[in-house]
Image: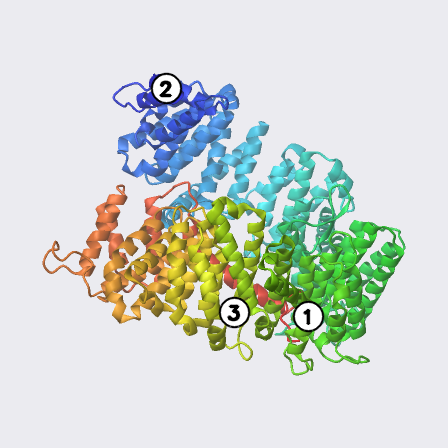
Amino acid sequence: MAANTPSATIEEKLTRLLDFSVSEFDVPLLDSVVASAYDTTSPERAAANSALMRLQECPDLWTRADAILERSTRPDARFFGLQILDDAIRSRWKILPAEQRTGIRNYVVGKVIAMSSDENTAGREKFFVSKLNLTLVQILKQEWPHNWPTFVSDLVGSSKTSELLCENNVEILRLLSEEVFDFSRDQMTTEKVRKMKESLNGEFASIYHLCEFILERSQRPTLLTATLKTLQRFLTWIPLGFIFQTQLISVLLERFFPQPAFRSHALECLTEIGSLADLEPQYDPLFRQLFTGFMTRLGDIFPPETDLRPAFENGSEDDCLFVQRLALFFCGFFRAHIMVLEDKEHQPHLMKGLFYLVKISEVPDNEIFKICLEYWNILAQDLYRNAAESKFPGQHRPGVLSLDGPPGTRPGSAPGPGSPAARKYMYGPVLTGVRRVMIERMAKPEEVLIVEDENGDIVRETTKDTDVIAQYKTMRETLVFLTHLNCDDTENIMLAKLTLQVDGTQFSWNNLNTLCWAIGSISGSMSEEEEKRFLVTVIKDLLGLCEMKRGKDNKAVIASNIMYVVGQYPRFLRAHWKFLKTVVNKLFEFMHESHPGVQDMACDTFLKISQKCKRKFVTMQNEETQPFIYELVEQLPSIISDLEPHQVQAFYESVGCMLSDKGQMVTVDRSAMLGQLMEMPNRSWRAIMDQANSNVESLMVPGTIKEIIKILKSNNRVCNMVGSLFANQLQTFFLDMLNVYKVYSERISRAVAEQGEIATKMSLIRSMRSAKKEVLRLLATFIEKSGPPEADPAAVAQGFIPPVLDPILGDYQRNIAGARDPEVLALFATVVQKLKSHVVGEVPRIMEAIFECTLQMITTNFEDFPEHRIKFFVFLRAVNSQCFPALFNIPAAHQKLVVDSVVWAFKHTERNIAETGLEILHELLTNVGRTPNVAQGFYQQFLLTLIQDVFAVMTDRLHKSGFKLHATLLRHMFHLVQMNQVTVPLFDPASAPPGQSNPVFLREHLSNMLITSFPNLTRSQVSLFVDGMFDLKMELPAFKMHLRDFLVQLKEFSVEDNSGLFQEEADEVTKRRDADIRAQRSAVPGILKPSEIDEDL
C-alpha cells in the first residue's frame, strides 16, 4: 500500500535515479519528477522538490549531466542538468581527473557552438544558451589561461565563420570581462585574478580587431548591438591606445550615434570613454575633440533650448532611456574633464552642454534627476571651495561668497581670466538655472509630517521614505553651496516665487511646499543681517498667507511650512527674543488645531526650538518681568488641553530640555521649577494612590492603568532630559511605583496560574504588563542619567537598587517565559554598566535570578524571544566588562553556562547577536588573562573547544561579517599556546606520548580537524596554513590575510558573496571617509543642519 502514496512514488523514482549501477540514466524519469516539482496543482510537488534537492547533493550526478542535456524534453529539467554541471565546475573541478575535466570542457564548448550556430535553435533556446555561456565562463575561470591558452584566439577565429556564432562569442567575451574585472574579488584569489587580467590585456588586440571588424562590416543589427554592449564593458580597462589611436570614437560618433537603433548603446560607450579620469595632459585635446564632435551630433538631434518635459512624458521607452544615458554622459564627462573645456575656444560648447544638463534636470523622472543632482552638487562644491581658497588661502571663508572679484577688484569690473571669480562669473547663468531647478524640485525634509496622498488629500505621513530623505540631504547641500556662490540670486528667486504664492498666481500645495523646504534648507548660509532681512519677509508673508487662505487643508499645509521654516533658523530666533516668543505662541495655537499631523509637527518643532534656544526660556529677556518658563508652566494645562497623550509627553520633554540648562546665567530654581512642571502628573498619581489605599482593586480598572502608563511615560521623557535633577522627583513616588509593580506582578502571576499562558494575551493583563514595562524603563533611564551632585552612583546603588531587587528579580524568576519582560534585562544591564563596582556584590544575586531561566528561553531555537535574546547578551557583556570578578563568585555550573551562552551567541545567525557574542568572548579572554588565579583552570576547561567553535563559525559561510573578530580571537588563542602562557595540558596526559607539549598537540589537533572537515584540502596546504597560525611575528593584518586566503581556497569560485571577509577594511575606509566629509562639511556655514550642530547654549 505504501508504494501507492505520492511521496513513496517519488521516493522510488529518486532511488532509481540515484542508482549508478545502471549504465544508462533514466532521463524520462527525471522529467517526470521535475514536472511534479513545477506543477503547482500536483499533490507530489513538495516531495518532488525535496527529491530534486537530494539529487543536487549527490556528488556524482554531474556525470549524468550530458544525458540530461541531450535527451530531456523539458526545458526546466535541462536547466536542472546544467545547474548540476555548474555546481561540479565550481566546487569539484580541482579534484576531477584531467581527462574528465577535458571531457566536460569539450562537451560544453561543442554544445555552445552547436546551439548558437543555428538561427532557429539560438532563437528558441535563447535563455538556455545564455545559461550555457555562463557555464563556459565558469570553466574559463578554472582553466584559462594556464590550461587553455588558445581560448581567445580560437574564439576570435571561429567568430569570422558565422555572424550568428560571432554574436554569441561576443556575448561570452562580455561575460568573461565582467567576471574578471567586476565580480572577481570575492570569488578568486588575488593571484588568479591578476593572471587572468594580464592574459585578457595581452590578448586584447585580437579581441579589439574582432570588434572593429564587426562594426565596420556587419549589417546584422543584433550582432552590432551585442558588440557595442561588449565594447562598453571593455572600455573601462583596455589600453588607451585602442581608444585614442584608432577610429573607434569616430565610428561611434559618425556611424552609430546618429542612428536611433544604436544611439543609446553608442552613447553608453561614449560615456565610458568620456568618464575616463586622471589621464596624462596629452589626452586633453582628444577629450576636447570628442566633446565638440558630440555636441555637434547632439545638436542635430535636438537644440539645447528644447523643453524636454513634454517630449519625455509623451516619448517612447527608448527616448526616455536616451535622456537618462545623456545625463550619465554629461555628468561623467564634466566630472572628469570640465576644466579642460574652460578655455576660451571651448567655453561655448561647455556652456551649451551645461544648459542641456539643466534641461535634462527638469524632466519628471526622479532617477534622472538624481544623476544630475549628483553632478550639480560636485560642481557647486568645487566652485565654492575654489572661491573660498582664493579669497582666504589656507582657510575656509567663514561667511558668504559673492560674485565680486577678489579684494582690490573694482566692483562691476570683469575678473581676470582663469581666476576663481572668473569661473563663477562664467558659470553664473547656468547656476541660476540650477537654483531654479533645485527650488522647484526640493525633496521633502524628514521633519515635515504633513503630505499630500495619492488622492490629493492632505494627511499625516505614516512612514519615512529613506530615498527622499537622502535626496533632500544632497539637494540641501547643493543649495547651500549655490547660496554661498551668489546669495542675492538665491534670495531673489525665492522671494519672487513666494510673491507668486501670496498673490495666488501660482499657488499650489506642491509649489509652496518645495519653496518652503528650499528656504528652510539654506539656514546658516547667509550672514546674520541678510538672514534677518530675508527671514522676516518670509515669515510675515507666510503668516499673512495663513490668515488669508480658507479651508482646513490649505491652513494645514501653510502651518506645516511655517513650522518647518522657523525650526530651521535657531540662530535667528536666539538673536530676536520677540520673534521667538511670537513663534512659540503660534506653535501653542497650532497645538489646538485638529488637522492630522499639525499638532504632531507643532510639538516636534517646539522640542527642536527648546533644544536650540533653551537658555532663552530660563533666563531674563529684555522687557520681560520673569523668565518665560514661569509663564509657560503656569499656562501648561490650557496649552496641552487638546493634545493626545504622546504629544503631551513630547511637550513635557521640551520643557524638561529647558530645565537641563545648568549655565551660570540661569537664575531659575531648577528643582522647584521641576516640581511645578510635574504638578499635574503628580496630582493625578496621588489621586490614584489615595484610591488604591482605600481599595487596591481600583488599580485594575483599565482607565487607571492607562493613566499610570501616561504618567510614567511623561516622567521618563522629563528624566531623560533633566538627568540627575530628576532624583528629587523620583523620590516623591519611588516606593509607590514599586508597590504598583508588585501588585501588577502578583495579579499577572495569579492569572497565569489559573488560566495558563493564554492569560498573557488578555487585554487587562497586557495593560498591566505595559505599566510594569514603563516602571522598568523609567528606572533604567534614571540610572543611565544619574550622576553628581543630585544622584551620585554610590548613593543610587545604596538608596535605589536594594528596594528594586526583590520585587523585580523575584517576579522575573518565578514567571512563565511568556510573562517575563525583556526590560528587566535592559534595566540590570544599565545598573551594572553605570554603577560598576558599586553593585559588584549584588551581581551574583542578579545572575541567579535571571541567568538560567533566560537561557532556557533563548536557546531552544534562534527565533523565539528576540528582545530577550539581545538584551541578555548586553547584560552579560556589562557584567564581563564592569564586574568581572563576580563571574567567578557564582557556582561552577553557572560559570560553564556563561561560556556556553557566549558560544551559542556567536553561533547565532542574527548578526548583532553573533557579533555581541564574539565581543564578549574577546573581553572575557582578555579579563581571564589578567586574572592568574582563574586563568589556567579556564584554559584547561574551555580553550580547545573555543578554538573549535570559532573555527566552525568562521568556515560555515553564515558568519562572514564577524571575520575581523574571528581572526582576532584565533590569533589571541593560538599565541597564548605558542608563547606557553597555557601551562596546564590541553590534552589527556595519560594517552599522550612522552614529552608532548601544548603547541605540538594543538598543531596536530588542528591539522586533523581541518583534513577531516575539508577532504578537498591537501596535507601540504593544511600544514602551510597551520604554520602561519602559530607564527608569532605575524601581526593582525597579515594574520587576517592568511586566514582569508585559506577561506577562499576552501570555496574558491563559489557563487557566494565573500565580501564579508573584507568588511573590516571596508568599514575602516567608510569611517575615514565619513570623518573627512564631516570635517569638510563643518567648515562650510549652513552645510550642517541646525539639529546636527552641538551648541553650548
As drawn, 873 above or below 261? below
Q: Which residue appears at 71% of the width and 60% of the height?
A: 479
Q: Nearer the viewer, residue 281 or 1039?
A: 1039
The residue that label 1 is drawn on is: 679
Left or right, residue 612 beside residue 239: right
| SS of the residue under disc 3 | helix
The residue that label 3 is drawn on is: 783
Left or right, residue 352 beside residue 184: right
Distance from the alpha carbon under mark 3 to that under mark 1: 23 Å
Q: Specify the quadrant that holds the N terminus.
A: top left
What's under tag 3, amino acid-wise?
Answer: Ile
Quadrant of the image occupied by residue 680: bottom right
Q: Residue furthest front?
A: 694
As drawn, 872 above or below 535? above
Mark closest to the chain's N terminus, 2 or 1:
2
Tell me residue 935's x, y (percent): 26, 67
What's under tag 2, amino acid-wise?
Answer: Thr
The residue that label 2 is drawn on is: 9
Q: Is residue 390 visible?
A: no
As drawn, 387 above or below 1046? below
